[in-house]
Amino acid sequence: MARRLFVRPLPPPGPATLSPRLGHHLGRIVRLAAGDAVVLFDGAGGEVRAAVRAVGTRELQVDVGAPCEPPLGRSPRLAVHVACAMPRKAHADWLLAHGTEAGVASFRPLLTERARRAPEPIAHWRRVLIEACAQCDRATLPALEPAATLAELCAGPLPAARFVAATAPLELGPSDASEALLVVGPEGGLTAAELELLAAAGFAARSLGPLTLRTETAVVAGAVRLLQAPPSGAAR
């Protein structure tokens, strides 16, 4: 597949000049050259074919063609939403990048008793999501939801399929719902009071296996478990 470039909004057919950030990255690092085919995507399902006209030191010029029919990018079969206590720095980047590749539809940072609040680098996180979408040929960009406490999360709209990663007799498995919400706590785990709050809000406690996982690993493992194709006729 041709290299995918995130551009919002998508330019109309004809010559177009892309942003300096894209021009520097693609010209100096990726080494795109005139004539190379690319696909422009807007993260909302829109895709168009394009060809590189010229690569400058601060911009990239392309000839925009027709929309991709059928679309080249793919989307997960299930909308998996994750609310989690975000780890710090590189671990948060890893969580967002690999969660995107695993198929997570949205990420919501959680404020918990054992996770201290820190400034959220939204612009940086958004770039991580964009790069992951381009890398894995994903059609839609995951949403970054505002940070919330567990009480705020439980008071909002919730899908019928909602789970919390915890020590439990039942393991998390594939879901045949159209959307699901998974809560993952911080490295120190959720407190008993927080687990009770989630249980009262209808969250089912599910194990992610016998090993103790980091928050970022738990997010990816949980998303993969939910997105596995459910057995035919399985009841959930």
Image (cartoon, grey):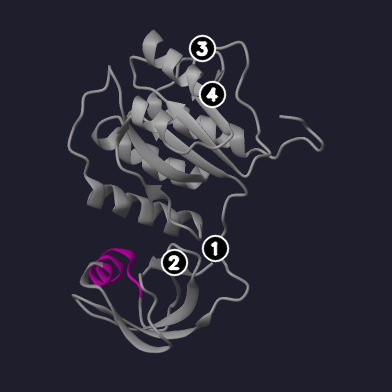
**Tag 1 or tag 3, which sits nearer the N-term?**
1
Find the magenta span and give its range: 22-32
Viewer-closest of 135 and 117:
117
Label 3: which secondary element: loop
Do the numbered discs 2 and 3 sit on residues whose CB atoms are within 8 Å? no
Q: Are marks 2 and 1 in contact (CB under 8 Å)?
A: yes
Using the numbered discs, state the Cα–Cα distance from disc 2 to disc 1 in whole angstroms.
9 Å
- In the rendered view of the protein, which quadrant contains the N terminus? bottom right
Q: Type of residue at label 3?
A: Thr
Residue drawn at point x = 63 percent, y = 72 percent: 70
- Tell me if mark 3 has few (under 14), some (14-19) or many (20+) residues whose alpha carbon lies within 10 angstroms of its own: some
- What's the amino acid at mark 1? Gly
* CA distance for labels 2 and 3: 40 Å
Three-letter amino acid code at the position of disc 2: Arg
- Magenta residue check for 30: yes
Amino acid type, mark 4? Gly
Comparing labels 2 and 3, the label whose residue is closer to the camera? 3
Direction bottom: furthest residue: 14
Q: Quadrant of the C terminus?
A: top right
Residue tagged 4: 202
Q: Earlier in the sequence, mark 2 or mark 4?
A: 2
Image position, residue 155 (x, y; %): 40, 31
- Residue 73, label in figure: 1
- Residue linked to disc 2: 4
